[in-house]
Image (cartoon, grey):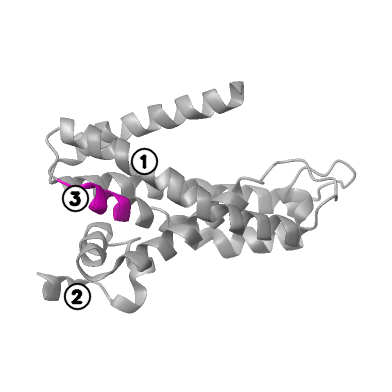
Amino acid sequence: MVEQQMHQVDDRHTILSIAVKPRDTIQYVLKTKNLPYFIFVGLIGMFSSNIMGFLGTSFYGQNTLGDIVSASFMSSFLLYFLSTFIVAGVLLVSAKILGGQGNFKQMFRVISITMIPYIWILPLLLFWMQFAPQSFFVITYIEMSLGDMILQFVGGVFIIIASIWTYVIMIIGISEVHKITKWRAFFASIVVLIVLCVILVFTKIL
């Protein structure tokens, strides 16, 4: 089975092949890659997600862009392991309730590779932040030009596409690991969204 998947997915382009062959790629990496691979992919994806979290926030110049990038990278370690453990655990329970057969190890690895679409847009985010900070952040003392508005629109479209594809990969991954239909995988994923919303609201209150 592994040999068959190796013919379908080029090992040199796994991070790209998941865009057109998500199920085949998920099967391939789960069968052939070791844990450090998933941790590396998940950390880089979380780093990109952290950078994206600064989009639209106020920037007053107290910290340099280098400070923001380094802080985003360092916090990626804690956030990656914490969020992946929580999401993998919740998905394991919800998928099991719906007849799933997977285990926590498989779910942890699948959640890690769902971060791949954020790796795609990391160069865009870093370029955008560096060369057009007035459209990436909210900087009240700099007026945006038409080019900044266009970049803001294009960047937003790429972020939306990456976020949607992340969710699609999650559903396919749940279906593949637990041997359930995509509809059951979708309903299992809804539980995770509810839990994440509750955590977000709780942290806002605190």
User: Which residue, as the protein is rendered here, is positioned at the far left?
Assistant: 1
Q: Are marks 1 and 3 in contact (CB under 8 Å)?
A: no
Residue that numbered label 3 is attached to: 177
Dot 2, crowdedness within 10 Å: few (<14), some or many (≥20)?
A: some
- The one nearer the camera, 78 or 195, is 78
Question: What is the quadrant of the C terminus in the image?
Answer: top right
Query: Mark 3 or mark 2, which is nearer to you?
Result: 3
Earlier sequence position, callout 1 versus callout 3: 1
**As displayed, is residue 157 above or below residue 93?**
below
Residue 65 marker: none
Farthest top residue in view? 205
For the magenta stretch, what is the residue range?
102-110
Q: Residues within 10 Å of mark 1 (few under 14, many from 20)?
A: some
Residue pictured at 43% horizontal, 58% vertical: 42
Contact? badges 1 and 2 (CB < 8 Å): no
Which residue is at the front of the view, 48 or 161? 48
| Separation of residues labelled 3 and 2 (CA atoms) | 19 Å
Provide the residue designation for mark 2: 6
Q: Secondary structure at mark 3?
A: helix
The N terminus lies in quadrant: bottom left
Query: Is 53 a magenta residue?
Result: no
Q: Is residue 60 left or right of residue 132?
A: right
Q: Quadrant of residue 58?
A: top right
* Residue type beneath disc 1: Val
Which residue lies under the disc numbered 1? 87
Q: Amino acid at mark 3?
A: Val
First of labels 3, 2 by sequence position: 2
